Image (cartoon, rainbow, N blue to C red):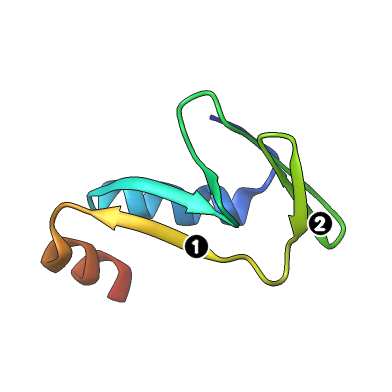
Amino acid sequence: MVSTCPVIDSWINELIKAGAEAISINDERLIASSEIECSGDKIRINGTTTGLFSPVLNLQSGNSAKFFSIVAN
């Protein structure tokens, strides 16, 4: 994954460490070759531009207890 958004990178890395098996932001599924770019109040994921300040995060976790313990910290 290539990204210019350090805060979002941090969130994604924490979700992966917590066991997230699938992550999407604003209906754009993140995969190893995904590109995330931030510019002003916009975010572009896989070539699709949306608003940065109202992202919708969707994830699937294999181990919800592990996920919640890491995210809570």
Q: Residues within 10 Å of mark 2 (few under 14, many from 20)?
A: some
Q: For the view shown, which residue lies furthest in the top direction?
A: 33
Q: Nearer the viewer, residue 7 or 29?
A: 29
Which residue in the protein does label 2 denote?
42
Q: Quadrant of residue 48?
A: top right
Taking the image as shown, residue 70 lies to the left or right of residue 39, namely left
Which x, y percent locates residue 45? 67, 42
Cα distance between the residues tagged 2 and 1: 15 Å
Which x, y percent locates residue 72? 29, 76
Which residue in the protein does label 1 denote?
57
Q: Residue at x 56, y 52 (%)?
A: 27
- Where disc 2 sits, the SS reads strand
Q: Is residue 3 above or below residue 42?
A: above
Q: For the view shown, which residue lies furthest in the bottom direction?
A: 72
Taking the image as shown, residue 28 lies to the left or right of residue 50, namely left
Q: Is residue 31 above or below residue 66?
A: above
Q: Are marks 2 and 1 in contact (CB under 8 Å)?
A: no
Q: Is residue 2 above or below residue 66?
A: above
Q: Residues within 10 Å of mark 1 (few under 14, many from 20)?
A: few
Q: Is residue 66 visible?
A: yes
